[in-house]
Image: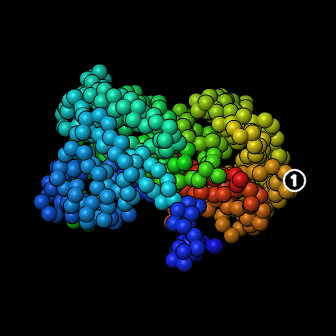
């Protein structure tokens, strides 16, 4: 039964009075879109009426459910009224606009800088939501105001944001310390007026005039277990695509200074977008940051994050070998399991590095390597990184094709002591599928012997409706990608879907969602992310 059919059934039962409202919605999937947006002088920079209307157009057109707004400045009530939202202001600057009712004010700190609301989402789900604005000490965005040789001055310019966020976060923890808030997820969003330590990193320093900066402000929430929703969905740093400051002044320094952070096992991010266009004229000097969340029900926790990624032994599309860049991208995805293809182990072309061990150490994950063949003084194959202990490793030898091949099968123990098999593969790549299909049949035989639930991921080098893929569709449930964004190769202009994630047996798993993530520089493939859970 489709989601729309389920909703229709619930509606009919509600009308007939056969089930109570909360019971009807409690088991339905919930997703919501949250936005952080500084609308610039109440959105009125281009006119008292026109500007705020354009703000409404953008929120409404992107089907946003909750807005963390800054520089509300008298426009908030009108904006919420037009949207049909609940309006929760505090002072003149920060406000919350919510499709969902506000159960309680949970604001802390100065009224100009922080407003909080406990929101009532469908199915009696509670969300603690904060809209914040942070100050800065010195202008370093306007033309001629930033000296990239003076890192201390750059850091000082944003240090006021660190001081305020430290105080704010301490007060939020205190405010939510009562047991009645236990387990409620938290979203903190707004204009931070500081850059992120996840952006100004060594592998991407060329984008920032050679600057590497460990910005302190962004550490405060990530060190407290929050995830940066944008960077999680866009793990490869791209300064021009990431920036929220400033669409109105392209000659100024373009940086990401608006953020949506979240914490809570129930929340997973499905997508994140920067919105900086309007059919007539974009009304603000800040782009809007929007994240779509899914709510995972307790019976499906923990939700496991799986990534499949052909890393091309760390060789980027710029012709540079840079395994640190690969590690940076992988770390941002916060995956539980990462299946890597085209991995070198002490091969000369990749500086004789044990890439599996190096990446595992960089991410703090357990690791295993499967060798296809000896190559340039080392070995060439594939690898698995796991957040959880690997209790058994097996190389499943596949029929030799254009090159030798194995599948890497790892038994893993989850925190609840359940065990699963995680299987990573890389099939033959030649156009004639004879070798590839033989390899797939041998792997299918192995899967049929498994008694544990398993996930299967990798570079299949074949496309939907092929006999290779049909073998696994007959045994597993596919982690379907969105139809409009399913291509994984080549990374720069994807035109083929050849990387996949499956799960078996069919009744052992619930697939929450799957996405192809952005990444045009780090490899010739794009990574595939899937979030799924073992069924109770």
Q: Residue 14 at x, y = what percent?
A: 53, 73
Seen at 24% across and 60% down, the residue is 79
Q: Is 215 left or right of 140, judged from the image as shown? A: right
Give percent across and percent down for residue 517: 52, 52
Please state, as top left, top right, bottom left or bottom right, where the N terminus lies in the image. Answer: bottom right
Horizontal arrangement in the rendering, residue 420 relative to residue 208 (left or right): right
Residue 485 vs 130, above or below: the answer is below
Q: Is residue 370 above or below residue 514?
A: above
Residue 149, by quadrant, is: top left
Residue 263 seen by the camera? no
What residue sits right under mark 1 in the picture?
A: 449
Residue pushed farthest left?
A: 48
Residue 302, image x and y in percent? 63, 46
* 267 up-or-down from 314: above or below: below
Residue at screen point 27% across, 60% down: 80
- Name the quadrant containing residue 229: top left
Which residue occupies 36% across, 31% down?
171
The reply to whether residue 510 is visible in this rendering is: yes
| Relative image position of residue 43 (x, y in whole percent) | 19, 55
């Amino acid at each position: 039964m489709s989601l729309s059919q389920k909703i229709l059934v619930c509606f009919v039962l509600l009308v007939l009075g056969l089930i109570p409202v909360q019971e009807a919605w409690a088991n339905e999937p919930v997703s919501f879109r949250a936005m952080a947006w500084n609308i610039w002088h109440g959105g009125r920079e281009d006119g008292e009426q026109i500007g705020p209307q354009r703000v409404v157009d953008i929120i409404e057109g992107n089907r946003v459910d909750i807005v963390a707004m800054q520089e509300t400045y008298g426009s908030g009530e009108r904006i919420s009224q037009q949207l049909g939202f609940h309006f929760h202001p505090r002072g003149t600057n920060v406000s919350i606009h919510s499709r969902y009712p506000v159960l309680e004010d949970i604001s802390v700190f100065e009224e100009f800088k922080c407003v909080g609301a406990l929101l009532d989402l469908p199915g009696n789900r509670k969300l603690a939501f904060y809209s914040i604005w942070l100050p800065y000490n010195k202008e370093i965005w306007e033309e001629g105001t930033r000296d990239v040789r003076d890192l201390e001055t750059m850091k000082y310019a944003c240090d006021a944001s660190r001081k305020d966020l430290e105080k704010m976060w301490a007060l939020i923890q205190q405010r939510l310390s009562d047991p009645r808030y236990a387990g409620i997820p938290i979203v903190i969003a707004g204009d931070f007026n500081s850059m992120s330590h996840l952006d100004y990193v060594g592998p991407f320093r060329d984008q920032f005039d050679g600057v590497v900066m460990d910005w302190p402000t962004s550490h405060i929430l990530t060190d407290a277990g929050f995830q940066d929703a944008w960077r999680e969905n866009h793990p490869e740093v791209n300064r021009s695509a990431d920036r929220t400051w400033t669409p109105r002044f392209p000659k100024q320094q373009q940086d990401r200074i608006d953020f949506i952070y979240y914490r809570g096992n129930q929340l997973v991010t499905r997508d994140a977008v920067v919105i900086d266009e309007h059919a007539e004229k974009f009304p603000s000097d800040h782009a809007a940051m929007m994240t779509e969340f899914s709510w995972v029900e307790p019976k499906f926790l923990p939700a496991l994050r799986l990534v499949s990624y052909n890393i091309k032994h760390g060789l980027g599309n710029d012709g540079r070998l840079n395994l640190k860049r690969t590690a940076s991208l992988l770390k941002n995805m916060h995956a539980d399991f990462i299946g890597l293809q085209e991995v070198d182990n002490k091969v000369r072309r990749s500086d004789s590095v044990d890439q599996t061990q190096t990446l595992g150490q960089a991410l703090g994950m357990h690791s295993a390597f499967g060798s296809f063949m000896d190559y340039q003084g080392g070995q060439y194959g594939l690898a698995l990184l796991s957040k959880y202990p690997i209790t058994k490793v097996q190389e499943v030898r596949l029929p030799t094709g254009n090159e030798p091949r194995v599948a890497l099968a790892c038994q893993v123990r989850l925190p609840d002591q359940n065990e699963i098999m995680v299987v990573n593969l890389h099939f033959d790549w030649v156009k004639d599928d004879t070798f590839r299909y033989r390899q797939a049949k041998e792997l299918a035989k192995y899967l049929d012997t498994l008694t544990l639930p398993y996930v299967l991921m990798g570079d299949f080098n074949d496309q939907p409706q092929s006999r290779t893929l049909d073998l696994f569709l007959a045994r597993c449930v596919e982690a379907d990608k969105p139809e409009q964004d399913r291509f994984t190769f080549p990374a720069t202009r994807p035109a083929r879907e050849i990387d996949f994630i499956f799960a078996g047996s069919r009744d052992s798993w619930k697939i929450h969602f799957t996405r192809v993530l952005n990444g045009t520089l780090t490899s010739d493939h794009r990574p595939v992310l899937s979030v799924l859970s073992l069924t109770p």
